[in-house]
Amino acid sequence: MDSAKKTDEKENLLAKVVSLCKRRGFVYPGSEIYGGLANTFDYGPLGTEILRNIKSDWWTTFVSKRQDIYGIDGGIILNRKVWEASGHTESFIDVLAECKKCHLRHQLDKLPKDVKTCPDCGGELTKARKFNPMFKTFVGPLQNEDATTYLRPETAQAIFTNFNNILNSFSPKLPFGIAQIGKAFRNEITLGKFIFRTLEFEQMEIEYFIQEKDWQKYFDRWKKAIWDWAISLGIKKESLRWRNHEKEELAHYSKKTEDLEFNFGGEYRELYGLAYRTDFDLRNHSRFSGKKLVYREEGKTGFYPHVVEPSFGVNRTFLAILYDAYNQEKDRLVLKLNPKVSPYKIAVFPLLANKENLVKKAVQIYGELSREFTTAFDGIGNIGKRYRRQDEIGTPWCITVDFQTIENETVTVRDRDTMKQERVAISRLENYFKKAMAAS
């Protein structure tokens, strides 16, 4: 297949995903009524549910079910000295060039090494310029240098600055980790390919503190844990690959980094990152703050633990899930979402919306199931249209309340992926769906 055809297919799939997201209430353009704002988006009711499911599953997997991980919620605005100590004010630099023809700006380290012209129109690029993507802000009423700080460009630093607090409160034994989920902000200069790269985004990060001699062992363990979690969400194995960072592209704090890349419509791009940060952060914060961020075992000399950092993008996870779930079949469009991330697990229909006894029974079933599952009630249009609507938003199971329901207290349960239907007693529905969820 030639490159032009591959590019067309890639852009076509992205366009279809974007259209579905807008039409069905997953993602909306930011500030749309004012013409929008580049690289900003709002999440609608269904998108918000998916994001919530992703974060909940991540927290359950990596924090709640582990005894060695401690969760925090660090601040978005930190003391400016944090970013000096972390190296971000000096080393967190993008290199950009602008196309003289179409005037798009490109981050040079994101382009293939052999690209010398604009990848969008082929125009000549301007001379490279350095650019720090951190957002500046001010604390207090005076907007001067002393009041300057930044919106955090990553969530990790609040973890390092709270290192001693976790030691003093919980006395953890090595190895242990500190985790958090939160917003980060970067003044991105390139087009984001929908929600792939945006001005504000959400990260799920862990700093895992270890003995220096053990770093490779734990790097490999986290590499497997990252892969396994991605697959558990319904992301396909064949869509993923690991890529090792070359020496010249390593971040200033990293000795080794690998990215788990996802095939976004024919183009592999970073989904998650795994970095060996050595003891760079704890050592630097100790030097800049004057507070020793060291680990001590009783009767032994304190030392700076080394760190392995698994970093997960919430929004990119969302996008990868949609890419792999998107299926255009002969007679329908269906999102084959894993039930654990689908916005609704179940939809309840009365067969006829103008039959009071059917509607009343459907409302009763909806009320009972919604105590345990995220459930939708849909009585608009004919039953076929309702099925297609729920297929498009990825609802795994639909329940239809019909006249037989009134006679024998059974309903029709229809499976999204196979479209098979079976009669199930109302009294068995909760256990039926619990079993189906566990098997997914």
Image (tube, grey):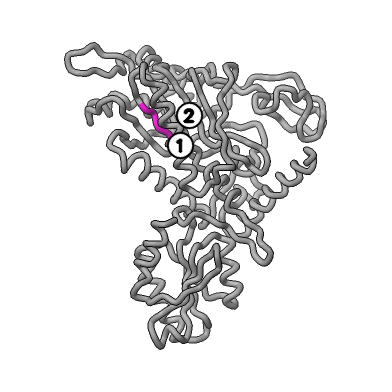
- Residue at left offset 35%, top offset 72%: 428
Nearest the eye: 189 or 204: 204
Please provide percent x and percent y for residue 384: 60, 74
Q: From the viewer's perspective, is 160 left or right of 337?
A: left
Please provide percent x and percent y for residue 326: 61, 54
- Residue at left offset 38%, top offset 71%: 429
What mark, if any, has residue 147 been given in the picture? none
| Residue that label 1 marks | 226
Q: Amino acid at mark 2?
A: Leu
Nearest the eye: 154 or 140: 154
| Residue that label 2 marks | 274
Helix, strand or loop at label 2? It is: strand
Magenta residues: mostly which secondary structure? strand
Marks 2 and 1, Cα distance to the nearest angstrom? Answer: 9 Å
Helix, strand or loop at label 1? It is: helix
- Residue 221 lies in quadrant: top left
Q: Amino acid at mark 1?
A: Ile
Point out the stretch of residues depicted in magenta: 204-208
The quadrant the C terminus occupies is: bottom left
